[in-house]
Amino acid sequence: MRALFRLIGCLGLILLLVAGWLYRDRVLEFARGILQKRPAPAESVGRPTEGGVRRALDKVDSLNAWRADSIVLTASEMASLIGAGLDPAFRGHMDSLQVGLEEGRIRIEASFDTSQIPKDLLGPLGSMVGNREHLKAAGPVSVSAPGRAEWQVDQLTLGSFPFPRDVIPRLLERATGSRSAALPVVIPQGIRSVAIHPTGVTLYGKTDGQ
């Protein structure tokens, strides 16, 4: 009996292989259809747009009006919210801004106008910096007060020069004229905390007890 079952199994496998070869075009078409139906992976990099700001604000409204516990912003929506909320004096020096989402952090890259930065602020680097350089900065974001968040920059590169981590706070304090090394970001009211992931940013609203 075992020999008979093995024979039947072998014949069945051969038939499947033959059928697969004869109808290979249909099999490939079916497989492509399944793959195309898979949801596209979430983007981890976004650029500010007017539409992105509107979508982000509409979602934030649901935290207040609809009593939602939390909402999730895409990379583009978060980029739009940050682009609109950065200090105009800082944002005005940036072109081609893009925001990348990392685990617990955001990363900003932009073409940065350095012409208004005092050369002595950059130290020995001042003589080597052009009027426009590629800026990269990264760090965590936290809600510090109603309608206000802070971006704690702990990685900063201007052109090809990465600033030492312990220099960044002093550099930002002098550049912004603030006593805080964190860059302020204006955010809509009703956001209690944020959780940043490569797939999106979760914003948590106030609970009934807050």
Image (spheres, helix red, strand yellow):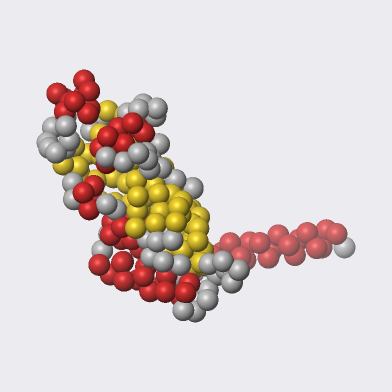
Q: Position of residue 195 (x, y in %)?
A: 50, 55
Could you tell me if residue 28 is visible in this image? no
Could you tell me if residue 133 is visible in this image? yes
148, above or below 210, in the image: above
Quadrant placement of the N terminus: bottom right
Point 49% across, 48% down: residue: 104
101, above or below 59, in the image: above
Point 63% across, 61% down: residue: 14
30, above or below 202, in the image: below
Q: Quadrant of residue 49?
A: bottom left
Q: Position of residue 182 (x, y in %)?
A: 38, 43
Residue found at the very far top of the displayed protein: 124
182, above or below 78, in the image: above
Residue found at the very far right of the displayed protein: 1
Point 35% across, 39% down: residue: 179
Q: Position of residue 176 (x, y in %)?
A: 27, 41
Quadrant placement of the C terminus: bottom right
Point 45% across, 52% down: residue: 144
